[in-house]
Amino acid sequence: MSISQMSGRERILAALHSKEVDRLPWAPLIDPYFINSLPQQGLDYDFIQACTYIGNDIIERHVCGPTATYQNVTQRREENGNIMREYFDTPVGSVFVEHTKTGETSYVSKHMVESVEDMKIFSYICENTIYTPNIDAFIQRDKEIGDRGIASLSGPMSPVQEMLQFISGVENTVYLLMDYPDEMEALFDTMHQRNKKQYDLLLEYPCDYIFDYEDTSTTVMSRTMFQDYSLPAINDYSDMVHQHNKTFITHMCGKLTGFVDLIAKGRQDGIDSVCPPQTGDLYPWNAREAWGKEKVVIGGIDPPSLVSMTKEQTLQTVLDVIQNVKNKHGFILSTGDAVPFGAPIEHLKAISQLIALLGPKSMGCEIDPEVIKQI
């Protein structure tokens, strides 16, 4: 049965519900990291202009979620050259996080929580966090995207992942769990209750899909940590979203092969930014085989490779995905995390041209490799 031509929005929504589509959805994860590199390519584009030029289906991330403010907490910043410190002063003490800028990005050079005393202060901050929704701004942005795709909401990650990635770092989190397991689990619970308040607000938005950005990877946590701390939180958030008949997708852009059986037990509807080697270690066809039709799979292209590959190599990579993912219902071709700074926009446009040329054939597996020469 042939499917009539769909808009980008219709295509993405159908794929998120594993329904029939007219061709393979192609929605790279594009954010300011890539957009800020476009002037070097002679283009002064914002997000929507860049996507229109590329010709991809749109899934815009992190759109107008709730704004966090704090009661009885004073924030202040100090900048010294390429170092910025953000302080949080509370009635129970002060903590700060330090960022160091290098090149086009920055990194955390000192984490907020490094001791059991810091944990108490951060717990106070979590208990005194207030969220304010930005529903009207979300509706406006979704209208601006229009038929080209969707604006999506971002839900907070599991407490253990937040600690690993932002609050304490891998080393500190592991040591604190070993030295103060009861205190850490109490902190996790406080963070989890704070997160559920944010999900309650997200569920009021006129949006049927929420992405939880876990950045899960065997390089930063063990199977035990994932099973005991990450998965239960993800499942709680999934249940909250499902009670409102909405779709819940978990962003997991790291190395996942060691977790595939555990991820299969998750109650989320799909996994976003499934990343193959070299950055990740899971090809989208292996993900589909491991999780079956039960989960939407979004991803398939290693982001850093987009900078180094030629146009022909980029198109061959896409062709490999098309030929190897046997069942593409509920599959969205994307990057395994953000399109990197400096990726040639013409190569992304070439992917759109290839998929448009293939049309309905892009949902099959038998593709003549010579088709690349027509782009």
Image (spheres, helix red, strand yellow):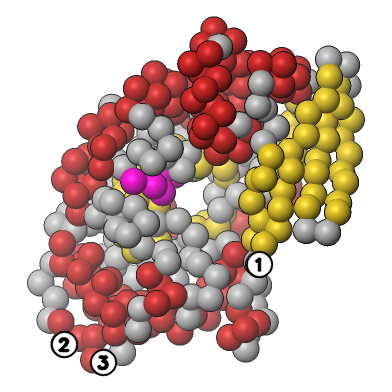
Q: Is the residue 294 above or below the residue 281 in the image? A: above
Q: Secondary structure at mark 1?
A: loop
Marks 1 and 3, Cα distance to the nearest angstrom? 38 Å
Q: Is residue 369 inside the magenta stretch? A: no
Q: Is the residue 194 above or below the residue 41 in the image? A: above
Q: Residues within 10 Å of mark 1 (few under 14, many from 20)?
A: few
Mark 3 in CB contact with mark 2 (< 8 angstroms): yes
The three-letter code of the residue at mark 3 reads: Gln
Marks 3 and 2, Cα distance to the nearest angstrom? 8 Å
Mark 1 in CB contact with mark 3 (< 8 angstroms): no
Task: Please name the residue that numbered disc 2 is placed on.
Answer: 370
Labels in figure, total: 3
Disc assigned to residue 259: none
Task: Please name the residue that numbered disc 1 is placed on.
Answer: 103
The three-letter code of the residue at mark 2 reads: Glu
Disc assigned to residue 374: 3
Measured as percent of width and height from the top left, residue 355 is found at 30, 75
Marks 2 and 1, Cα distance to the nearest angstrom? 40 Å
Q: Residue at x 64, y 51 (%)?
A: 107
Q: Residue at x 19, y 41 (%)?
A: 290
The N terminus sits in image quarter = bottom left
The residue range painted magenta reads: 249-255
Q: Is the residue 347 above or below the residue 142 in the image? A: below
